[in-house]
């Protein structure tokens, strides 16, 4: 495992944007990114049939093509590139992989989140207060018009179950989040579908990562959601999330000694 270069003045920030047929929204997302905060921009084309990849290339992003559909698959592909395990489709000769102590941000490509909130998302990491920062749409005052009713209900139910079964108190499963590289490696993420965010939060709780929520703004996305835009998609996402929560609780009860080891070291270097 790599270690952070002590000569660096600050951690580097890698941004992963999973994208599936987001040709219209993606340019606006990239335009709204604050200058000077992102060192490595990665757009993961998750099998798009439009000009999503071309838009990303024109903006100077590293592009990864991931044919296996699924939000988690796209996030894992972007993560593999940032950690130097894969090459970008459009070349990355001068690319230097992220190491422990650097930060990775995940942001959707549909412009439902505000990229301008990135500085606030990174602030707890910069202050040494967190290993994982979750952008909470609930704390940010997201309306039901922006967050569809089925998504709002599923989100609240999941947070309730996490509190009851794991003692993990969250207000949201928001995809806009930032995490320290060493912490993310420690979680050994594997879900390739809708369960990516809940997997991260549950494993973070079990591993005793320091998790902070910050308010982020939220608006109605451009286009139709691939997850909650249809009844089938909503049911699939809900089943996946509930399966992760209940399945993990049962697994830990049956295998109490096989839980994720406690995360001892973070970018702050302080023991947990």
Image (cartoon, rainbow, N blue to C red):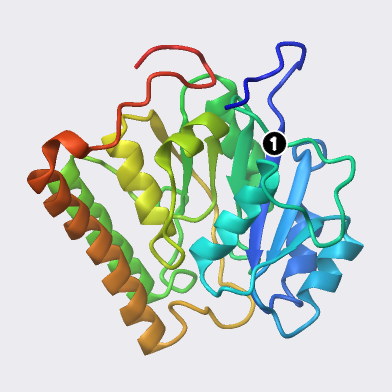
Judge from the rendering whether residue 73 lies leftward or rightward of residue 15; answer left or right: left
Q: Quadrant of residue 221?
A: bottom right
Q: Which residue is located at x 56 percent, y 66 percent?
A: 219
Query: Could you tell me which secondary element the residue under label 1 belongs to?
Result: strand
Q: Residue 99's x, y, as percent?
A: 65, 29
Q: Is residue 113 visible?
A: no
Q: Residue 134's x, y, as percent?
A: 46, 44
Q: Is residue 32 visible?
A: yes
Compared with residue 272, is residue 255 higher up or lower down, i.e. above or below?
A: below
Q: Residues within 10 Å of mark 1 (few under 14, many from 20)?
A: many
Judge from the rendering whether residue 178 lies leftward or rightward of residue 194; answer left or right: right
Q: Residue 7's x, y, as percent?
A: 77, 11
Q: Which residue is mark 1?
A: 13
Q: Which residue is located at x 76 percent, y 84 percent?
A: 50
In front of the other: 48 or 68: 68
Compared with residue 130, is residue 78 higher up or lower down, i.e. above or below?
A: below
């Amino acid at each position: 495992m790599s270690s952070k270069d002590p000569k660096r003045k600050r951690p580097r920030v890698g941004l992963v944007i999973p994208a599936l047929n987001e040709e219209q929204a993606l340019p606006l997302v990239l335009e709204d990114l604050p200058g000077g905060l992102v060192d490595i921009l990665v757009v993961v084309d998750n099998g798009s049939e439009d000009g999503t990849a071309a838009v990303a290339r024109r903006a100077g992003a590293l592009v990864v093509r991931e044919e296996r559909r699924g939000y988690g698959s796209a996030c894992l592909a972007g993560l593999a590139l940032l950690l130097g395990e894969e090459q970008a489709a459009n070349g990355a000769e001068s690319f230097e992989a992220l190491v422990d102590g650097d930060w990775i941000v995940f942001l959707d490509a549909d412009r439902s989140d505000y990229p301008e909130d990135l500085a606030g998302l990174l602030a707890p990491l910069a202050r040494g207060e967190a290993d994982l920062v979750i952008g909470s749409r609930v704390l940010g005052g997201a309306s039901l018009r922006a967050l569809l009713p089925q998504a709002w209900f599923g989100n609240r139910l999941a947070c309730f179950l996490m509190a009851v079964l794991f003692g993990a108190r969250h207000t949201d499963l928001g995809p806009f989040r930032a995490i320290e590289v060493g912490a993310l490696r420690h979680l050994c993420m594997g879900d390739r579908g809708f369960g990516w965010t809940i997997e991260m939060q549950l494993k973070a709780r079990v591993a005793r990562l320091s998790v902070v929520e910050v308010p982020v703004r939220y608006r109605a996305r451009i286009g139709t959601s691939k997850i909650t835009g249809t009844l089938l998609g909503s049911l699939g996402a809900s089943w996946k999330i509930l399966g992760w929560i209940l399945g993990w609780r049962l697994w830990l009860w049956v295998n109490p000694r096989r839980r994720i080891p406690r995360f001892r070291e973070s970018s702050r270097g302080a023991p947990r």
